[in-house]
Amino acid sequence: MSDHAPHDAHAAHAGGHAHPTAKKYVAIAIILTIITVIEVAVFYVPALHPFLTPILLSLSAVKFGIVAGYYMHLKFDPKMYSWVFYVPMVFAFAITLVLLWLMAAQRG
Amino acid sequence: MSEAIAAAAGSAPVVPDDHHYTSTGQSSRKILFWTFIGSECMLFGSLIATYLIYRGRDKVGPHPHEILNIPLTSVSAFVLLMSSLTMVLALAGIQRGEMGKTRLWLAATAILGMMFVGFQIYEFNHFVHEGLTLSTNLFGSTFFVLTGFHGAHVTVGVVWLWTLFFLTFTGRIKAGNDLDVEICGLYWHFVDVVWIAIFTLIYLLQ
């Protein structure tokens, strides 16, 4: 299992980079599992509850980025795909924040 | 064309593909599918926003902290995470022309997806027995709509995976058709990243 294979046809056609190897995919899965275990462990540690929101949001953002970057190949494919994915997501995130702010303001 | 692709890739000659490329040099199907995923971001963004806006506004129970089962959902989250691994292994298999491995990992992904849906059916059933339905309170309405939409997406993914699995036996999916598996994989990983957000925002940040 070469560290540089495989090159798929359309990645090459599109000017993208080679996708990771199976070994790397397994290594990424181990990292994702460790992060998930940390997330659940943090939930059960009362001393960390004041910091629960930033810790869990950060960990989930890391997991999200790893899956999108390595498993969905955004890290290796042309940037256009990242734009098509992340721009609507930023919109959705902004709409969520604005709605939360509006509803909080309405509650007084 | 295939020689040029191989030269550009700097590797051994690749299997010729029959995909339609746009003027951007990208596959039209892949662009289309990424655009669909972008629209799905908006859909799930609105569902998650609705859940967050109505959180803590219930006048009657059961409330999230009384009913959500973190150990059970952690296991189902792990199952879905592992299905993303098996999905990329299926893609790596077809990219190498190893159809046996492709079939194995496609079936594994579909089975893990079915396990996830099974966990969700069990959870929904348990909640209904505890008195939480779609119309009990705001938590019930927003929770069932959000996680129900996600579960429906997983179910569609499972059907898609089994379809690909059976098409590998008919010869419709063979070495060189890696884009078919890659697009299914994009959908599957998207379903996984949505669950990463749901697991944190709904289950862990109660």
Image: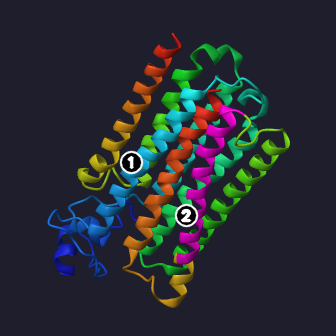
Horizontal side, residue A55 vs residue A89: left or right: right
Spatial separation of the CA atoms under disc 1 and disc 2? 20 Å
Badge 2: chain ID: B
Count neighbours of disc 2 (C-alpha within 10 A) and say few if under 14, some if 14 to 19, many if 20 or more. Answer: many
Specify the quadrant that holds the N terminus of chain A.
bottom left
The mark tally for this picture is: 2
Amino acid tagged 1: Gly
Residue at 16% x, 76% y: name it. B4
**Which image quadrant is residue A87 in?**
top left
Amino acid tagged 2: Gly
B51 or B41, nearer to the observer: B51
Residue at 44% x, 31% y: name it. A96
Element class at badge 2: helix
The magenta-colored residue range is B137-163
Badge 1: chain ID: A
Count neighbours of disc 1 (C-alpha within 10 A) and say few if under 14, some if 14 to 19, many if 20 or more. Answer: some
Judge whether residue A1 can be spotted in this image: no
Q: Is residue B138 magenta?
A: yes
Q: Is residue B16 above or below residue B116?
A: below
Q: Is residue B160 above or below residue B194?
A: below
Q: Residue furthest bottom?
A: B170
Element class at badge 1: helix
Q: Quick check: marks 1 and 2 in contact, CB under 8 Å?
A: no
Residue denoted by label 2: B157
Residue denoted by label 1: A69
> Principal SS element in the magenta part?
helix
Residue at 30% x, 48% y: name it. A82
